[in-house]
Amino acid sequence: MTGLAHRLEGRRPEAPGRSQRTDAQANTALGAILGAVGMAVAAALVIAAVGATGGIRAVTIVAPAAPANGGAAAATATEAKPAALAAAKTTTVKAIGASAAAVPAPITRTAPATVTVDFQTKEVVAEVAPGETYTYWTFNGTVPGPMVRVRVGDTVKLKVANATGSVFPHSIDLHAVNGPGGGATATQTPPGKETTVSFKALNPGLYVYHCATGPIPQHIANGMYGLILVEPEGGFAKVDREFMVVQGELYTNAPRGTTGHHEYDHKKLLDERPDYVVLNGSVGAITGNDAMKATVGETVRIFFGVGGFLPSSLHLIGEIFDKVYPEAGGVANTNVQTTFVPAGGATIVEFKLDVPGTYALVDHSLGRALDKGAAAHLVVTGAEDHTIYGGAATGAGH
């Protein structure tokens, strides 16, 4: 795995006023209020259609002309414009998104071992979307950080090195750890320093890890999260393809689509109003040349987690999950259309591919997928089977 050493050792109220409002004043005020309501109702929402590429929808509010002043106050509504952003910064990494295919190989050994994992925390500048930059805080320079794969019973020796150029201390809390802070109490790491922690992987499952240095929400929102898989004894059934997808949010000081350098906005985070909801760090990180790829007839397993603060309704448009491990537990559900993944949680889904085409993996709270970025593509090649699906293979979906 690029950037991750993963080896084995053995492995108040206002006064009502001095004068009372007259009936005429009251009627005038009421007219103004009704006028404002009328304008709001008359406002038209013009929504650009989304094509098969899963592009971001543009929503435009067209306000009608203000009514003529007929003695009552004319009600107008204007929306405050955000301050102009600073120019986009020079990026320090080519792309922030970790490859969905960057999944460590299945474990074939039959006995526990000691596994050493090295992390480096880095603060980097990357594009959220074309022309829009953001300073991400990361594990190993990507969002999510590298996926860790161990076996139940393994002893994990984990090192956290905070890059010398970092501005902030960082740490790691792994939900797979039985111990104070999930490892964070031992790994509070200042810039230029290293810390270590060891733990035994007692419970099989797929777990989230994240930074747990205060203010913790800011560190997570800036990109410090990832997945650790603890395989059960005997491992998983063999599949043809495995992918890693992690959902998160970005809370910035300007609306999405604004060119320039975006800064973290703590109030938006507290209000849970993200500008972006992304899969693997940025808009479109798992599309185009970076889409997941497979072939008709193959079986696919996706390790999916929520590193941020909004739960996900995971859905693959045009497919059905043959198996879903809810919250990444040990018992599978079958034939599932959409599965709920809580904040700080994960799931494992498996399915066989029957029809070629481009499939969209989305958060089915669709405003997040169509407008804010929570969509990825799975491109499937191979022969068509019209007994299974006789419709067009391309075109707009939902």
Image (tube, grey):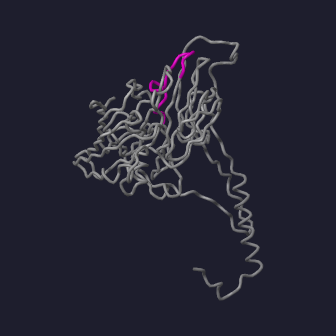
397 over 133 or under it: above or below = above
**Residue 195 placed where, x, y %?**
26, 48
- Give the number of marks: 0
Q: Which residues are magenta?
A: 283-299
User: In the image, is 76 to the left or to the right of 258?
Assistant: right
Does residue 223 appear in this view? no
Q: Position of residue 302 (x, y in %)?
A: 51, 30
In the displayed orientation, state which residue is furthest to the top.
383
State the residue lying farthest toward the front: 111
Instruction: Residue at 68% x, 13% y: name it.
Output: 386
Residue closer to the observer: 170 or 394: 170
> Relative to residue 258, is residue 13 depicted above or below?
below
Could you tell me if residue 221 is visible in this image? yes
**339 is within the stretch colored magenta:** no
Q: Quadrant of the N terminus?
A: top left
For residue 284: magenta? Answer: yes
Decide which of 5, 129 is in the foreground and name it: 5
User: Is residue 393 shown above or below 202?
Assistant: above
Vertical arrangement, residue 137 with respect to residue 242, above or below:
below
Residue sitting at x 29%, y 36%: 116
Quadrant holding the C terminus: top right
Which is more toward the observer, 215 or 283? 215
Left or right: where does residue 29 sit relative to residue 100?
Answer: right
Which residue: 59% across, 17% down?
A: 356
